[in-house]
Image: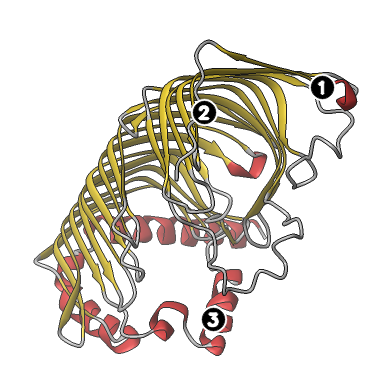
Amino acid sequence: MKRFLLILALLLTLFVTSLTLFFYLFNLNDYAAWGARQMEKSTGYQVSFSTIENKGLKFSISGLSVARAQEMLLEVDQINIEVARLDLWHRQIEFELVELAGVDLRIKPRSSEDLNGEPKNREKRQYQISNLFWDKLQINKLRVSDLNLDLSTAQQSLQLQRANISSDNLAVIDNKKLLSAAFKGSVNLDFATLVLQFAELSALRLDNLSLSADLDLPKLQGSLALSIKQLAFTAPKQTEIIADNSVLDLQLDKNRLSLTRLLTHIFSGELSLQAEALLSLDLFPRPAFSVEHLQLLALSLKDMQLTIPAFMPAAQDDVSSRSEKQKLPIATLFVQQLKVENVDIRSEEKQIPLTVQGLNGRVSDLYLLKNNQLPGLSEDANQTGVFVLQADYLQWADSVTEGGQIAASLTENIQALALLLLENKAAIIEKD
C-alpha cells in the first residue's frame, strides 16, 4: 500500500511539473495560425493578429483584428493578460491584469434580428450563460485605453471617441452566474465625445465626460461621481438644450438614493439640487425600479430663461380621457426648499398664454405629488406649506400685472387657506 501511494505521489509530482513546464515553455505564437482557422470555423469570424507571445501565465497579443464577411468589426493594437490564479479542478480563474490599448469597435447590425436574435437563439444563449464552465472569474485590474466605438443601425447610432475605462476588483462570474446585472467593483470612465442619434432626428452629445463609481449592487450599495463639460440635446423640432460644466454626486444605500450635489449651467442660468429618494429596487430577473418618495431638499434656479414648448394635443385629437387623472411614475414628491431668483418664462403653448419676467420666489414644505397624482387643494385636507412669488412683469392672455407678489400659507385645515395678494404697482391692460 505504501509503495502504491509512493508511486501515485511521484506520478502526481511528475504531472504537475510537466504541466508547469508546459505553461512556461509552450509558445502560442507557433500555433497562432491554426487557432485562427479553428476560430473562424467555429464562429464564422475572421481573426488575425501580428504576434502572440506568452511567458508562463502572461500573454501578449499585438495587432488583433476581427472581421465578418470581409467587413472589419474589431481592431486592437495591444492586449496584455496576466493570470494570477488558475484552478482547473475547482474551475476558478483570477486575472491580475486585462489590458487593451487602441481599440476600434464597429458594429453595424443588418436587421433587428442581429440585435435581438431569434427566440431559439436567445434561449440557446440563455442556456449557455446559465451553464458556464467557470465557477468563478475575477479580474483584479481591467484597463481599456483609447477606445473608439461606432454602433449604427437604420434607426439610430452611437459614436464614442477616445474613451478610457478602468475597473478594479471586478467580479464577472460567481457560482457559475454571470454578474452583469449585479456588478461589483470600481469603475473609472472618461471620454472625449459621445454622440447618440435617434430615429426621430433627435440627438444627444456629451463632451469631456469623467465618471468614477464604486458599486456593490448585490448589496445595493455604491457611490458615483460624474462631471460633464457640455451636454447638448437636440429635440425633433430642432429645439436645443445645452448644459455646461455639470457635476453630479450620488450615494446608494439599500433602497435610499441620495443626490448630494447636482450643479449645472443651463438655460442661460444656474441650477443646483440636493435630493433624497426612496426606491423600490429589484435587480432580478431583470433590473427594474420605481420611485416611492422623492424629496427635494434644496432646489435653486437662478438667472434662467425658460421656454414652455407646445405639447398639448390639438382640439381634433382624442381627449376623452384627458379629464381622468393619470398615474405618474413617482408616488410622492415633496419640496422641502425651492428658491427662484431672476427667472424669465415664456410659453409657446397656446393653451398656456404666459409670459413672466424677473420671477423671484420661495417654496417650502409643499407636496407636489401624492399617490402618483397631483394633489388638489380642495381634495387634500392635510396639505401644508408656504410659498412666496414675486414678478416684475406677468402676462396671462390679455391681462398684465407689473410688480405683483403672491404669498400663501397652507394650514392643516385647507379651508383656512390664507392668501395675500400685494401689488406694489399693478396695471391691468385689456387688449382688443
The reply, left or right, for residue 122 in relation to residue 238 is right
Q: Residues within 10 Å of mark 2 (few under 14, many from 20)?
A: few
What number is the disc on residue 122? Answer: 3
Q: Amino acid at mark 2?
A: Ile
The N terminus, quarter of image: bottom right
Q: Are marks 3 and 2 in contact (CB under 8 Å)?
A: no
To which quarter of the image does residue 16 belong? bottom left
Q: Earlier in the sequence, mark 3 or mark 2?
A: 3
Picture coordinates of residue 53 (x, y %)? 17, 58
Picture coordinates of residue 180 (x, y %)? 52, 56
Q: Earlier in the sequence, mark 1 or mark 3?
A: 3
The reply, left or right, for residue 7 in relation to residue 282 is left
Picture coordinates of residue 197 (x, y %)? 30, 63
Picture coordinates of residue 62 (x, y %)? 13, 59
Secondary structure under tag 1 reads loop
What number is the disc on residue 428? Answer: 2
Q: Amino acid at mark 1?
A: Leu
Which residue is label 1 attached to? 417
Q: Residue at x 35, y 71 (%)?
A: 199
In this view, which residue lies farthest toward the top? 424
Q: Nearer the viewer, mark 1 or mark 2?
A: 2
Mark 3–mark 2 distance (CA, rounded to whole Å)? 67 Å
Q: Is 352 drawn above or below residue 430 in the view shown?
A: below
Q: Residue at x 36, y 69 (%)?
A: 200
Q: How many marks?
A: 3
